[in-house]
Image (cartoon, rainbow, N blue to C red):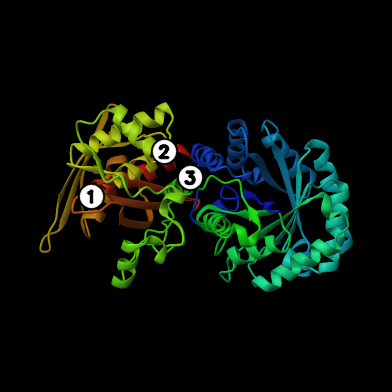
Amino acid sequence: MSRNIKIFDTTLRDGEQTPGVNLNVKEKVMIAKQLEALNVDVIEAGFPFSSKGDFLAVKAISKEIKRSTVAALCRANKKDIDCTWEAIKEAVNPRIHTFIATSNVHMKYKLEITKEEVLKKAVEMVSYAKKLCKDVEFSAEDAYRSDPEFLCDVFSKVIKAGANVINIPDTVGYALPKDYYKFIKYIMENTEGIENAEVSVHCHDDLGMAVANSLFGIMAGATQIECAINGIGERAGNAALEEIAMAIDIKKNSLGVYTNLNTKQIYRTSKLVSSLTGINIQPNKSIVGANAFAHESGIHQDGVLKEKSTYEILVPELIGINNNLGIVLGKHSGKHAFNMHLEDMGIELEKEELEKAFNKFKELTDKKKTITSKDIEAIVHFKKYFNETYKLKSFQINSGNHIVCTAAVEILKGDKLFTEVAVGDGSIDAAFKAVERAIGMNIKLRDYSISSVTDGKDALGEVTVKIMDEKGQIFVGKDISEDVMEASINSYINAINKMIDES
């Protein structure tokens, strides 16, 4: 009999701990709503006690999500638990996710308490959380490096205290698949009352084993996998949701398991997370990378043209990529035709989002003769979740290999127009300096990247800019345009606007 595996997404909690990622409340809510469209079972919305921003984001997500369980992380102490409950109590299906470390190295050097004290605190805090929330998950931090007998004792007692879910993380990504399988199997066979709880696995990718370990975990009997979109997270990241989802989908007969995911939402979710976090997806990334369904070898191309299954074990349509729509729209296409095409692509937008996307589409049709599905996809995934304090009105660049690069910009702030000129080491540097002079700010640029998101000579370019404020906080700005200079300046202004909006 096939078993249902629950998918616990931690993109908004562990994923946001990726260095350089800083999402605002609106962006987190948008990702959460897309995760619900993907039909994940549990959305870990954040760590409310860690910051006011996280608390507000978790609270906002709790009000928006209607089907998925909304979980929030907290340490095993009353202040954390109270704060977490306050953030999630309005959710339709709330879950308190509390944790404490159980490995010798963590207990000795981080917590500086004994095994007995850890056990006592774990039981007391699970019991306390249970009085507030009917759904409680307990995680033993650094479980894989913990004493198995002690771990079984902790798990049996927290289950008795009311834990609905026990999580067995490989916190530092140390395990190999066969060893993790044996470890989970031991816990399953030696924990009293484990049949009364869901068993979850949470694997990190420090040795590149996160997805494999997660799959071996469910083979050993686990019923929930904790993962993140695009595998983002601390250090080398988490198990990638899209890889786990498709491995289970393709191998469900041999694994004897299935998920509730709507896999046709995978690609859109991946692109949204990439766009908002500013973390580009590597081309050879499994499932969602640009090369995932590309074939360079002549032998491979010949085989695929004759029969796709010769070299493709899954088709792009399974994850929501439609490669058969071709050139579809032009400058005379109306909003209805635009919306119909979005529906053909499996994309549903709310009224306000549709209006913004259509306006961007009309801007593009003035500059580009034919619009493809890839163009539309890029437009839809490009969103602004911040107040636009400054807007670019116009720019002019004068550059060459034997002259000093000069940039002139006109920047609007409400009804006020600011005009400035600057020189720099190249057109990008000159343009950014002109923007800084116009708005009267000195900005620290951390990263600049550009990539082509569509095909052909008039391809859309996507520019990502990362800037840093005085506190070391990173802000990401993006823009798309067939003019890379325009996209560059707008992405810089977008990053500045986001920094102002959140200061």
- Asked whether residue 113 is in view, the answer is no
Report the residue marked by disc 2. 347
Give coordinates of residue 231: x percent, y percent. Answer: 53, 58
Where's residue 370, x and y in %? 20, 42
Q: Gap in Å between the C-alphas at discs 3 and 2?
A: 9 Å
Circle 1 sits in a helix, a strand or a loop, which is it?
Answer: helix
Amino acid, disc 3: Gln
Marks 3, 1: nearer the viewer: 3
In the rendered image, the quadrant that contains the N terminus is: bottom right
Crowding near the residue tagged with mark 3, few <14, some 14–19, many ≥20 C-alpha atoms within 10 Å: many
* Residue on which disc 1 sits: 485
The image shows residue 99, relative to residue 217, as above or below, that is above
Disc 3: which residue = 265
Q: Which mark is residue 373?
A: none
Residue type, numbered disc 1: Met
The earlier-in-sequence mark between 3 and 1 is 3
Indicate which disc, 3 or 2, sits on the residue closer to the N terminus: 3
Please name whichever residue, 384 or 263, is drawn nearer the observer in this view of the structure.
263
